[in-house]
Image (spheres, rainbow, N blue to C red):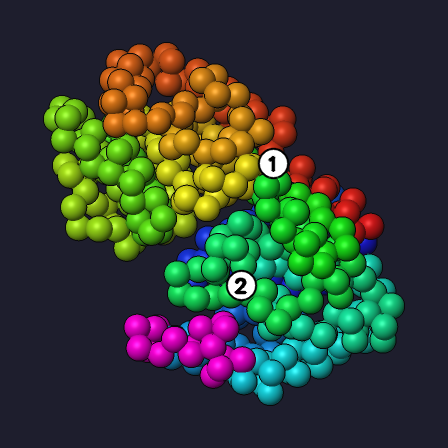
Amino acid sequence: MKLLCLCSALDLKFRYGCTPAWWQFFKGLHELGHDVIAVPYQGAAIESPWWRVYRNPCQWEGAGFAAAKRLFARKATSLSAGGGASRKLVETWIRPRWEKHIASILEAERDVAAVIIFTIPVNHLTGVPQRLRGRFNVPFFYYDGDVPASLPRFSGYASGFRIYEEADLSEYDGVLCNSEGGADDLVQMGAKRVEVVHWGVDPDLYTPLEIEQDRDVFCYGFGAEYRAPWLEAMVVEPSRILEDCRFAVGGRRFKADLGRAECVGDVPFNAFRQACCRSRINLNITRQAHASVFASSSMRPFELAAMGCCVVSNPYNGIETWFDLERDVLVVNSVGEAVAAYRRLLGDEAARRAMGESARQRVLDCHTHRHRAAQIAQFVA
């Protein structure tokens, strides 16, 4: 099939958590024999061996809006996706330009089998699928990789970014998402068909790296928001108790007090594998929304498992959907359990390696980018 894939971004410099996933999904579709055409909603159009691109018709407008939002984020809530300034900009400028651009691509390509929109704010394109489907006789699909945090019952993100306000899911031929527990919400919001496609990883990209392990416990993430209690229970307090262990935290927007844990700052995408593989234990601390709604996948456990890491996780409703608890991943429920788990695992290298090898094999068997690409292709076919 020839698939037109509109996605939030292709340029990794924006550090959107889902951008590496789009690379892997599109690579998987290519490896299965599909012709992938990618168009980014934010940033430049990045060509690759696995897809070809069309330009972003609003690249400079997007850059200006992002800069304005950063500048006024604390003062001007109207710049949020649900705000009046943003809505006006979308309705009068962004949406018409994107509709014209998508139409021009469909006219040029002619035999596109489906259009898939990957986590672009769905209310930014309201009405476009309905109009272009009739004009070009091509189905439209939407993939929301942020469920459940994006759902109205979670009130959008802390920034007020509400993608479903004034959106109409019934104009799509189908909706895909990453959450089994959130799928019913999408049906109730008007989706005709819903398919759960969890995150997956390219095991050739996330592969074990044999290097010296000079850290004991490592946690990587983007901020403490919605997971602060588990950072306290799995990093801050254990680091004070286990004085002979080296704890490290990588990422941005973490609170100043991390106990005895070293804050190593941001970790570039190309250094992520090394940062994880040099650690004897890697933590999966999932945000409250994903952890509380059944089987709402995030990228981190699949990434860590694919690299053969020994993974300890906070309580995560549905993690057993993807991994065998104890054999692949260990879940702790308190400071005491975390400390006991760290002591046991740090004292038993064979157990750590066995967990990592089992987790990687689970990914190879069930959770690769090709598994997910095959699901997407089957759903839209």
**Amino acid type assigned to the residue bearing label 2 in the image:** Ala
Residue for point 72% across, 74% down: 128
Q: Nearer the viewer, residue 272 or 240?
A: 240
**Amino acid type assigned to the residue bearing label 1 in the image:** Thr
Q: Disc 2 to disc 1, how far (Cα)?
A: 21 Å
Which residue is under mark 2? 9
Residue 199 position (above or below residue 71): above
Is 276 on the left-hand or right-hand side of 16? left
Residue for point 54% across, 59% down: 152
Which residue is under mark 1? 368
Q: Nearer the viewer, residue 188 or 344?
A: 188
Residue for point 71% across, 59% down: 190
Q: Is residue 146 visible?
A: no
Q: Nearer the viewer, residue 204 or 158?
A: 158
Q: Is residue 80 visible?
A: yes
Q: Which residues are magenta?
A: 70-87
Identify the secondary structure beneath mark 2: strand
Within the magenta stretch, is there residue 83? Answer: yes
